[in-house]
Amino acid sequence: MINIRYVPHHAQSPKGSVSPFTGVFVVNTPAHDHSGISHLAEHMCFRGSPYYPADHELFVANALLPLAINATTYAGCTYFYVQSEDKALFISAIQYLYSGLTNTHFSQCAFEAERNGVLVNELTLLEGNIDYANNIAIRRNDNSPMAYQHAGGFSDSVLEISFDDLIDYKKTWYAGDHITLLVSGADTDGNEITSLCSQAIAKVGARGFHAKSGDAMPHDKVAEAPLNTLKRETSDSVLPMSSYRMSTPQKSNTHLRPTENYVSTWWVPQEFTHDLLKVESLIKSKIESLVQKKVECSSDALGHFFIDDEVNHAGMIALRFVHNSKANAQARTVAHKNVVSLLTDLNVEAKPRLFTDTKLPNAVQRLIRDFQQQTHSRYSKPHSPLKLSPFVDYLCSVHVCQAAIHEVGVKNKNEDAPINDNWAPTVEVENKDEDKVKDSETALLAANFASLLSLDNLPVLPRLLHKLAVRSTQSAQSAQNPENRFQCIGNHWVYRVNTQFHHYLIDTVTGAAFWQPRTNGECYALGVAQFNGEIFIYGAQDNQASTRDLWCKNTLAKIDTNASVSYSPA
């Protein structure tokens, strides 16, 4: 049985508001390499289970029910969370999550669709950002003992994960002592809520499992303590199931040629992160001023400085300096001297670093911070003096590697062009009967809480798609083309739904057919959301984006036919 902890919620809710019930499953998911297997395992937890068999359960619940479910993977831990003000719905969602966490029975088709389709699309979206692409290029070429193991994986490395690898990983890490459930809620009886969670979880185990095709036996592995990995907060919106850090890809690197650069890295304890991030912009500006002055061996001795503040297996973060591509050995030595001199002059002190990820709800972050303080010795006394060497001592050792770096700040002329429009399923569906069963399976959370289904619960449109939504709305006000509801840039699209179809959306969205582009792996994200008083159907990193205008119209046309209504979509 897993460990369940109740964490009292001490903060008072604003007058007239209700603090939601919050639950976080903390799963020990070590990253031993760049394969991204912990990332794929997270995705597969939402691919149905014997207790909640529908593949589209998550999407319907997040769209139409008053709750939020999501997950995020770090190099060491994966966090699955749920929030809802409705106690019964919250308990059912806890049961749904646990059922998915412990499930190890998947069809080969579902595995291929999620790995080759959804996950590759997500990573391709990330890798289209120049800053992200440069960072992972450095990580892939860093051979130091301190080098990061990239938990998210890369669009090519995830394809090397086999079906047996996945089953082995899930059976090893998604079980027993590797899972902890944290729960909280204002003015809540801790004993009651933990008892209800325990009963719901016990029912999943009592029901038992019936293996589907392709089940694999695990290899023996020794359990490891979870690693603490933190990530700098960003302001980008979160797509449903946005499981690894996502920055909005403003500049694609698809058509830019990288150049080989030397990269110098200084590893420092994570406790220096707070002060370093405060002065990162100052460091960069001072380096730029040195370039302008052309000190010593000319500007070839300089380059680009940044902080990779993810925490590695040793509790360290990386200070990176990307040398000018023309820099020779002498110039690199001068650059080292200049960077170390700048860093030495700064007032950088060690401070306790606690978990922060602004993409997550505040209550979720509080639970994770509490877990870390209770679990990890380095956080057990956050206000006690930290026994670390002075910051400058860590600047004495530098590691140098080479990586193919894209020039930052170069605008790609074709950034609005499709990134990839040649995707095809990699696996034929051999079991047609099983496929039909999956299509007919009911989203149980939606069915069991039908009275709570409402379009008022629709999430806000992800920020990545706001530009498209504005274009669609503006077209409605245009005399030339007032009904141009569909807008598409590259592999992202939105379709503004006419108000006369809103009444039928709940029935459509709860059905498996609506979500097939996502469950078949054709896109990274698909959903229904609200923006500026309008309702939009949307897709992100969709390999069939150019066909979705017709797909949306046909979807709405089917609603009208079934309802015997004479409306037709524009």
Image: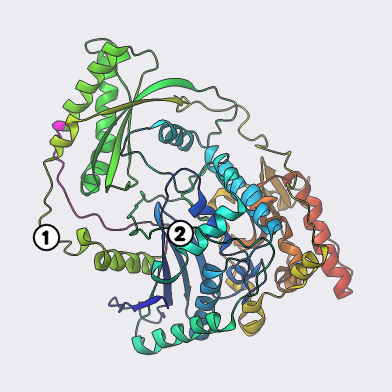
Using the rendered view, name the quadrant where residue 295 is placed.
Answer: top left
Q: Is residue 383 above or below residue 278?
A: below
Asked if residue 354 lies in the magenta stretch, the reply is yes
Is residue 326 left or right of 443 when viewed as pictured? left
Q: Is residue 182 above or below residue 392?
A: below
* Placement of the C terminus among the 4 image quadrants: bottom right
Q: Residue at x 68, y 38 (%)?
A: 420
Estimate the x, y position of residue 308 in percent, counting from the top left. 34, 40
Earlier along the polypeptide chain: callout 1 or callout 2? 2
Q: Residue at x 49, y 33 (%)?
A: 130
Q: Nearer the viewer, mark 1 or mark 2?
A: 2
Q: Which residues are magenta?
A: 344-360
- Label 1 packing within 10 angstroms: few (<14), some (14-19), many (20+): few
- Label 2 packing within 10 angstroms: few (<14), some (14-19), many (20+): few
Asked if residue 539 lies in the magenta stretch, the reply is no
- For label 1, the residue is 384
